[in-house]
Amino acid sequence: MIVRFAIDPAILSVAQIPNVRHDRLIRLWLQQRIGVLVDVKHEDGVRAFGAAVQKIEDPKIRLLWVTAYAQAVKIDLLRHVRSNASVEYYTPETLKLLAPHIDVLVIDGPDKGQYGGELVRTNKGSTIRRFTAHPSSQVELIRLGLFDRADEITNALELRQQGNIPHKYSIDSIWQERFHRMFHVSQDVYIVDRFICERHDEMDDRSGLARMIEMAKKHSAVNLRNKKITIYAELPMKSGLGMPKAIQNVSEQIHEAIKMQDAAPNPFGQINIQFVPKTWFSNTYKDRYIRFSSVGVIGGGHGLEVFEGKDYTTRGFKSISWNSDIDVCKEVEGALASGSDPLDPVVIFASD
């Protein structure tokens, strides 16, 4: 769905690379939101690629990248890894640091082993190298002009077009294919799923929320304590049951489902629910989706039930979709929150 990529700052000092190649990568990054650019941040706050942008000699290319970098900051499509050493261009040591956090490295010429790593295979126009023993340290190296042809890029774009998830498809595979990278780079996750609280009475150990938490713990190598999940849902109300008791019941059901799903203890910094009245929800928004911060949205009428199903296999879906309408989703969430009751989100979990 997305790609985490890094660009060796050495590229920016190569004068003979045509502007169109820079422009093509930038459009794919910022307009199609193919993913996030991962920079190397020194302990003094200086970012290697960001600093190199300011030093580009060609005025047209410098303006192109200065503008792009500023826009990426604004729309939050930059991430970083910390380095104790000051970095001007990438070395084998830099790649060992970056490898667990990126899928693609853009380089200024053919891969001749200058970045180190074990050669896994050679593709048409790119190479795949492994930089540490960890499975996630495998990176595709490709030249700037071929960025849009990288296997990781084409696979991500093709996956966005594949709306069908077969019946009894592995939920672990769905996570790895569609959710893992999105979770990795997103600090905040927003879930609009009006029926999630109602389904806890019926789904038992197949709770979508509990299963999602389990997948995040199982497949994430990063610290999840800095991540927050906000859910917009209806509050199931039974006759004669007041709101405080209804909220307590939902909280207890979610806690119990998480215990049953081997998702306990909750790994996230916080999980909140905005309870939205049924009429307000119906008048505001009728779809369901999961928004990963500024990166992208997975929806198509489905929310957390994507993770439901016996024996860790799905019940089958035909309309899972990806979109980048971040601003539209923020408007929807703001409208739902303005009509929520109680007005403030209810904290279901909070880290100590």
Image (cartoon, helix red, strand yellow):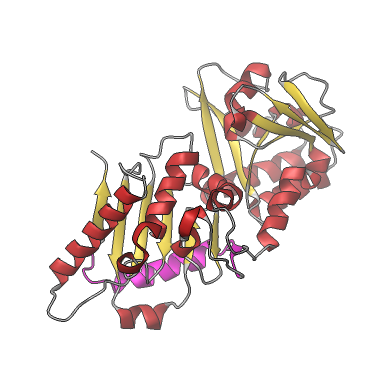
For residue 127, what is the image quadrant?
A: top right
Give the tally of numbered discs: 0
Q: Nearer the viewer, residue 215 or 50?
A: 215
Taking 295 as reference, is 62 left or right? right
Q: Which residues are magenta?
A: 319-344
- Screen quadrant of the C terminus: top left
Q: Residue at x 61, y 50 (%)?
A: 177
In depth, the one of 2 and 120 nearer the eye is 120
At a point 61% along the width and 22% down the height, the residue shown is 133
Task: Inspect the magenta stretch and tell me whether residue 343 lies in it.
Answer: yes
Question: At x 47% / y 70%, what residue is drawn?
Answer: 288
Question: Measured along the vertical axis of the image, is residue 96 above or below residue 270?
Answer: above
The outermost residue toward the front is: 311
- Look at the picture and state if 217 lies above or below 233: above
Vertical position of residue 95 compared to residue 144: above or below: above
Instruction: Decide if residue 124 is on the left or right side of residue 311.
Output: right
Give the residue at x 47% y 59%. 310
Is any part of residue 78 visible from this angle?
Answer: yes
Q: Position of residue 80 (x, y in %)?
A: 53, 34
**Residue 23 appearing in the image:** no
Is 144 a magenta residue?
Answer: no
Can you tell which quarter of the image residue 345 is in? bottom left
Task: From the top left corner, tell me how far across and down residue 128 is, in percent.
Answer: 75, 31
Measuring from the top left, give residue 74's x and y in whole percent. 52, 50
* Foreground of the two, 322 or 86: 322
The image position of residue 349, as x and y in percent, is 26, 49
